[in-house]
Amino acid sequence: MIVILKQNSQKKDVDAFLKQLEEMGFEHHFSKGKSSTIIGIIGDTSSLDADDLRTNDIVADVKRVSEPFKLANRKFHPLDSMFNIAGKMIGEGHFNVFAGPCSVETVPQMVETAEAVKSSGASFLRGGAFKPRTSPYSFQGLHDEGLKILLEAKKITGLPIVTEIMNQAHIDLFEDVDIIQVGARNMQNFELLKELGKCNKPILLKRGLSSTIEEWVMSAEYIMAGGNEQVIFCERGIRTYETFTRNTLDLSAIPALKAISHLPVIVDPSHATGLPWMVEPLTKAAIAAGADGVMIEVHNNPKKALCDGAQSLTPQQFDDVMSKIKKYTEFEGKVLEK
Ligand code: PEP
Ligand code: MN
């Protein structure tokens, strides 16, 4: 349920109203926008009478929210969420490029790739230390050692880092990581999501391989319900009957999410297609569709990569993509974060 407050409401009356809600056992979410102030009431509100609430002098209107997600819902938070992560702005008016290899392999591999993507204009460095692989015989990542290498690359280049977590038991290892990624395969690992809800770190939530948009938003809701409101969606392609591309990039997810949620949305054209030459056209398409950023796999030597080399761009190819997308972000009125 959402309560829209009258513009001229006095703070003491608002506080009294919030206290009354608390005494009735309801949690609330307060959102002050430019033109309206909204109180989102969380929990089972079936016992609340909208007409009773309307009798309060500070209440302009009361609406029931039919969607099962509340905190991630744009109705609870009409303005786009904006996050300042390690000095980079993510959200409305800004465009961030997350780049780096699929997996962390060695110090020279990470540092060389990080320096290259930084000089081309990436704002975040990616790299997996814990890798969710289809085969147990494939390279599983360097784990703690990989995180150390990633932090070394962060120290040398100054680029903030994003890396995937697969198990809540590892949360303490991610202390110096700037954004924790939840991969497609863990989008509905609810125990993991609940633990991430308790930590004070931005979460990049990738879409599950066969998840609907509503299921995806419900996963964001799990994180937010724990108190962590910094969630960024990442569309990375879904399973369809098409086999030409590794997955099918669902560009419609961008405007869909923007309509129903206030959280930022980025796109991963590398995992969506598995084809390095599709990264450029789909990055342009993502910008045009309203994305707040892209995540691109780049490796200093893709042929030697231990994971996803075939879809990774060389630093030169990445530089080329970056120089071509500038005018698209400008056209959309977005600042390319550096
Ligand atoms: C990744 O980003 O390295 C990754 C494994 O992606 P996804 O979870 O989207 O498959
Ligand atoms: Mn990968």
Image: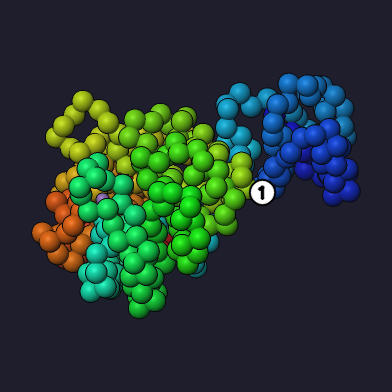
> Residue 283 vs residue 171: left or right?
left
Which of the 4 image quarters holds residue 338? bottom left
Which of the 4 image quarters holds residue 247? top left
User: Can residue 338 be seen here?
Assistant: no
Residue 291 lies, with reference to residue 49, above or below; the image says: below
Residue 96 lies, with reference to residue 25, above or below; the image says: below
Residue 260 lies, with reference to residue 133, above or below; the image says: above
Which of the 4 image quarters holds residue 207? top left
Residue 53: % across, % down: 83, 28
Residue 292: % across, % down: 41, 50
At 69% from the left and 42% from the top, the residue drawn is 29
Residue 79 lies, with reference to residue 201, above or below; the image says: above
Image color mode: rainbow
Question: What is the tally of numbered marks visible in this picture?
Answer: 1
Classify mark 1: helix, strand or loop.
loop
Residue 87: % across, % down: 50, 68
User: Can residue 56 be seen here?
Assistant: yes
Residue 274: % across, % down: 19, 45
**Residue beneath label 1, please?**
34
> Residue 108 vs residue 190: left or right?
left
Farthest residue in the left direction? 303
**Neighbours of disc 1 within 10 Å: few (<14), some (14-19), many (20+):** few
At 30% from the left and 51% from the top, the residue drawn is 131
Locate the N terminus and report the quarter of the image it occupies.
top right
At 22% from the left and 53% from the top, the residue drawn is 139
> Residue 207 vs residue 20: left or right?
left
> Residue 201 vs residue 6: left or right?
left
Q: Three-letter amino acid code at disc 1? A: Lys
